[in-house]
Amino acid sequence: MIFARTPHAFTLAAVLAGMAAAPAMARAQAECLGEPSATRLHIVVQGVRSSDGVITSTLYGDDPHKFLKSGGDLKVWRYPAKAGSTEQCVYLPGPGNYAVAVYHDAKRAYRFVQGTFGMPTQDYGFSRNARLFFGPPSLSNARFPAAEGDTTVVIRLRYP
């Protein structure tokens, strides 16, 4: 087919280009969980020992009084664990400061299980790889900024 340089040819070319881009855009939106927004978070969880169960990711806002508290989360996502590295894309409410806590729920208990003295019994991690030190990390140790567009956090699981 030969396109002449007419307004109709440019219109047809634009429509065809838009049709080609539409599946890619729809696929990108389908791959992220949550209410679509202009701010996306890619969570990469490294050190996953098995593909059993799910990885649970919990998102917290910038309020230190709500961090790691019951009912203090903004959103919780569960997705299949993949040995080695598990990745997930989620939509954030908007730009701002956030923190993420993750754990590998290999037995699908659907809750974070703690043992003696409140120590975790499941593999866990925090954004910025914040560490436990005589208790859970503070929000300031796990906080990261998210701008409009894509932000990636890499979390290395720690073992009990």
Image: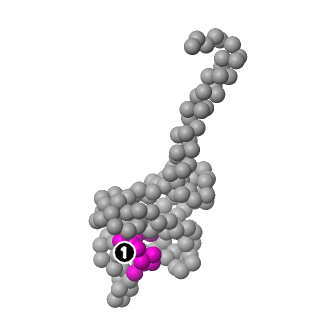
Q: Position of residue 134 (x, y in %)?
A: 36, 82
Please, is residue 85 above or below residue 9 in the view?
A: below
Is residue 13 something one can see in this rendering? yes
Horizontally, residue 106 falls left or right of residue 77, namely: left
Q: Residues within 10 Å of mark 1 (few under 14, many from 20)?
A: few
- What residue is shown with label 1? 107
Q: Is residue 151 magenta?
A: no
Secondary structure beneath dot 1 equals: loop
State whether residue 135 appears in this view: no
Using residue 35 as the reference point, say whether residue 7 is left or right of it.
Answer: right
Q: Position of residue 45 (x, y in %)?
A: 38, 61
What x and y, as percent, mark residue 110? 45, 75
Relative vertical location of residue 35 with respect to residue 67 in this rendering, above or below: above
Is residue 108 covered in magenta? Answer: yes
3 and 113: which is toward the camera: 3
Quadrant placement of the C terminus: bottom left
Identified at 57% across, 59% down, the residue is 34
Q: Residue furthest front?
A: 1
**Residue at x 57% of width, y 78% of height:** 71
- Identify the amino acid type marked 1: Lys
Magenta range: 99-113
Q: Residue visible at 65% across and 22% down?
A: 12
Residue at 55% x, 72% y is 73
Q: How far from the left and from the top, in percent, is residue 21? A: 56, 35
